[in-house]
């Protein structure tokens, strides 16, 4: 009886989640009319933020799920929408991503003749969080507990390596320069707008985490996208922090390295609630201790950053 009740609750919760998702993406699922001249913005979690800042009467962009959330039926729906779209803004996506026809070239092929296409970078910036990495490890698909980020200091502790508690300012700048250089490299592969020059000067609002930019990046990047789509001056300020549900600590030595006009934040903020950095560290140490093969893979992927930190010890 108890198991049946628990199952019923689980099914009900699942049903509620499906309904909420279809409501949230009503235009995408055909449950609300799409506007004339609509376009779509395709990519990771940054894509929805870009859609927010470019969507206007001149550039009506409909909300769609992030590319890694789409199933086969939803990909078919996306291609059907593209067949009537006036523009596509997309991050670079390899052909047959996740075994589905989601590659940028595959999406472009579904557009009508004359539709505009703007390719934009997926942005990562480590200058405000030079201790942090977000990793996609095919052999280990699950994320770390509490927050889906790896801290080089916690990884080093778990692996028995010695690193300092913080970096000197020169090393912070070097980590930032390396992430900008990588962004420039990817921009040079045929993208239509650049973001790499938007990280100077460094201000607090540039990034919430290593892969979640803030308004200080999204608004000027949105201006460039709107101009590339033929609607200069039509960027939209949403009047609230974008992509801000997760905020990593802003540590005092990082504030000092950039001379930021901001107060340090020692802890995480997740969904508006404070999450102690110590609690994250302890949970991640336990996670690595139970998964030595995963820890070895993380150490291997984080080798350049670990080298920067061990050199500063």
Image (spheres, helix red, strand yellow):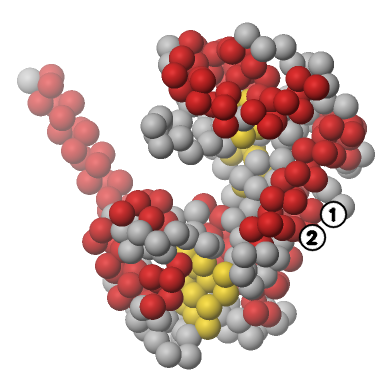
Q: Could you tell me how far apart the alpha carbons at marks 2 and 1 are, in whole angstroms?
A: 6 Å
Numbered circle sitting on residue 19? none
Front position in the image: 146 or 240: 146
Up/down of 56 relative to 307, above or below: below
Q: Does residue 96 appear left or right of residue 231 in this picture?
A: left
Up/down of 97 relative to 253, above or below: below
Please report the residue visible at 70 percent of the width from the left and 73 percent of the height from the top. 224
Up/down of 274 relative to 31, above or below: above
Q: Does residue 129 appear left or right of residue 120 in this picture?
A: right
Badge 1 element: loop
Numbered circle sitting on residue 200? 1
Front position in the image: 253 or 175: 175
| Percent of width and height locating residue 150 | 58, 28
Q: Quadrant of residue 280?
A: top right
User: Does residue 35 appear in this view?
Assistant: no
Total labels: the figure holds 2
Q: Where is mark 2, residue-wise?
A: 197
| Percent of width and height locating residue 237 | 68, 65
Are circles 2 and 1 on residues that touch, CB within 8 Å?
Answer: yes
Front position in the image: 31 or 141: 141
């Amino acid at each position: 009886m108890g198991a049946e009740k628990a199952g019923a609750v689980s099914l009900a919760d699942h049903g509620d989640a499906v309904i909420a998702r279809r409501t949230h993406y009503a235009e995408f699922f055909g449950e609300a009319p799409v506007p004339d001249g609509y376009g779509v913005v395709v990519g990771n979690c940054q894509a929805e933020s870009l859609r927010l800042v470019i969507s206007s009467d001149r550039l009506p962009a409909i909300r769609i799920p992030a590319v890694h959330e789409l199933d086969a039926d939803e990909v078919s729906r996306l291609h059907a929408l593209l067949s009537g779209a006036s523009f596509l803004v997309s991050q670079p996506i390899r052909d047959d991503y996740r075994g589905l026809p989601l590659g940028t070239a595959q999406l472009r092929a579904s557009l009508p003749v004359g539709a505009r296409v703007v390719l934009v970078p997926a942005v990562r910036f480590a200058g405000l969080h030079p201790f942090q990495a977000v990793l996609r490890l095919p052999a280990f698909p699950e994320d770390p507990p509490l927050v889906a980020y790896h801290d080089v200091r916690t990884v080093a502790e778990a692996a028995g390596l010695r690193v300092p508690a913080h970096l000197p300012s020169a090393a912070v700048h070097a980590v930032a320069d390396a992430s900008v250089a990588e962004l420039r490299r990817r921009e040079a592969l045929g993208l239509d707008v650049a973001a790499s020059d938007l990280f100077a000067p460094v201000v607090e609002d540039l990034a919430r985490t290593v892969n979640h930019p803030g308004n200080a990046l999204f608004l000027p990047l949105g201006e460039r996208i709107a101009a590339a789509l033929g609607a200069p001056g039509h960027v939209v300020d949403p009047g609230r922090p974008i992509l801000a549900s997760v905020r990593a600590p802003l540590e005092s030595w990082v504030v000092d390295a950039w001379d930021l006009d901001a107060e340090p934040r020692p802890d995480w903020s997740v969904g508006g609630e404070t999450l102690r950095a110590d609690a994250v560290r302890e949970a991640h140490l336990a996670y690595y201790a139970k998964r030595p093969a995963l820890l070895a893979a993380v150490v291997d992927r984080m080798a350049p950053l670990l080298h920067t930190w061990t050199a500063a010890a």
